[in-house]
Amino acid sequence: MFRKILVEFAAPILKCKKAGDVLFIILGKQIAKVDAESGRVIQSNAVFPQDSRTRDLVIDEDVIYCEDFYRLHKVDLATLEVVQTWALGSDLRSDVCSVGFDDSKIYASIRNGAFAVIDKASDAVKKYPVSQTSIWEMIISDYIYAGNVAGELLVIDKKRISVVKSKAVHRKNLKSLLLDGDLIYTASQDLSIAKIDRKTLDVILTKKRCHRKMFYLAGIWENCLVTVSPPCNEMKVWDKNELTLIKEISGGTWGAFTDGGLLYEIIDNRIVCSRVADLVD
C-alpha cells in the first residue's frame, strides 16, 4: 500500500485544505503553504495571536477565510496576512459553525441557526434567521445545501437567504455533505449515510450502522465513497451507487479528504498521503 509522509512539522496540525497544487495548513498560530506533490513548505506566517482548537479555513481565489471561534478572518493568499476580521458573534452561543462562498458573497452559519452574509465588494455584514437548530456544514452551488442539528437537509435560496425546501433525512446531526452531480451524500451522528436526489430531495438510498461511532464523508473517487471514523480508528470505502462496503482500512483521523485520486490525512504533526486505488486493492 502506498502511504507516505508528505510533510512533517514541529507542532500538531489542526486543519488542512487543498487548492490547486498547494495545501493550506493551520498549525498553532500559523498558516503554512505546502507544495502538494513534493511536500516542500512554500511559505508560513504567524497569523493568529494565540493558539486555538476551533479554527477551520476555506480557500477562495486570492484569499483564505478562516473561522476562529466567533470571528471570521480574511487572509491574503499571497502574504498570509490578516487583512480583515469580522466579529460575527460574541461567545460560544454565537460562534461560527461553517463557511462557504461564491463570486459575490461569503456565507457563515452561526450557532443556533443564524446566517451571516458578507458582501465581498463592501465587506458589509447582514444576518438572517435561517434554521431552528445549528447548521454544521454547507455546500454552495445553485442554492446553499446545508445540514443541521435536527438531521435536516436544507435548501437555502442565496438571494433571500431563506429555506425554500427541507427534508428530514437523519434522526440527528447531519454533519457531513458531499455533492456529486445531481446527487447529495450525507452522513449523520445516527451512523447512517443517505444518497439524495439534489433536485427533489428524495432519499434514494440509506445505509445504516456504517460505523460503530461518529464518522464523516472524506470524499468521492471514481465509483467509491470514502468515510472516516476517528473514534473507531477505521476508514471504509463504499460503492457510491449501492452503498455496499468494498473495503475496511485500519486508521483514520479528523480532517482527511480525497483529491485527484489521493487521500490526505492529518496525523499529529504530519500530512500523510495515500492513493485511494491502493486502499481499495
Image (tube, grey):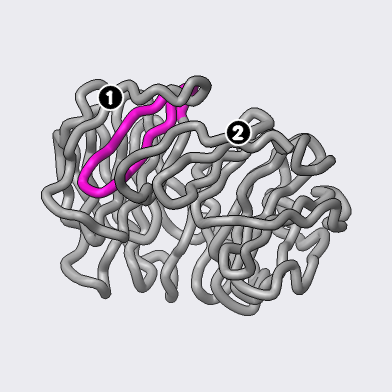
Identify the image quadrant of residue 101: top left
Disc 1 from disc 2: Cα separation:
22 Å
Residue density around tag 2, few if under 14, some if 14–19, many if 20 or more, within 10 Å: some
Single out the mark in the foreground, 1 or 2.
1
Give how far across and how far down residue 159 sits, in percent.
Answer: 41, 45
Q: Nearer the viewer, residue 263 or 222?
A: 263
Image quadrant for the N terminus?
Answer: top right
Name the secondary structure under disc 1: strand
Q: Quadrant of residue 265?
A: top right
Q: Amino acid at mark 2?
A: Asp
Residue drawn at point x = 22 percent, y = 30 percent = 80
Closer to us: 118 or 268 = 268
Kindly identify which residue carries mark 1: 43
Asked if residue 121 shows in the view, the reply is no
Examine the structure image and report whether residue 222 is included in the region drawn in magenta: no
What amino acid is found at the position of numbered circle 1 in the picture? Gln
What residue is at 57 percent from the left and 58 percent from the top? Answer: 176
Task: Kindly identify which residue carries mark 2.
Answer: 259
Seen at 37% across and 61% down, the residue is 97
Give the x, y percent position of residue 58: 39, 40
Depth check: 201 or 251 in front?
Answer: 251
Q: Image height check: is 173 above or below 37?
A: below
Q: Give the mark count.
A: 2
Q: Is residue 70 visible?
A: yes
**What x and y, as percent, mark residue 281?**
84, 40
Highlighted range, magenta: 19-34
SS assignment at label 2: strand
Mark linked to residue 174 = none
Q: Position of residue 4 (x, y in %)?
A: 59, 35
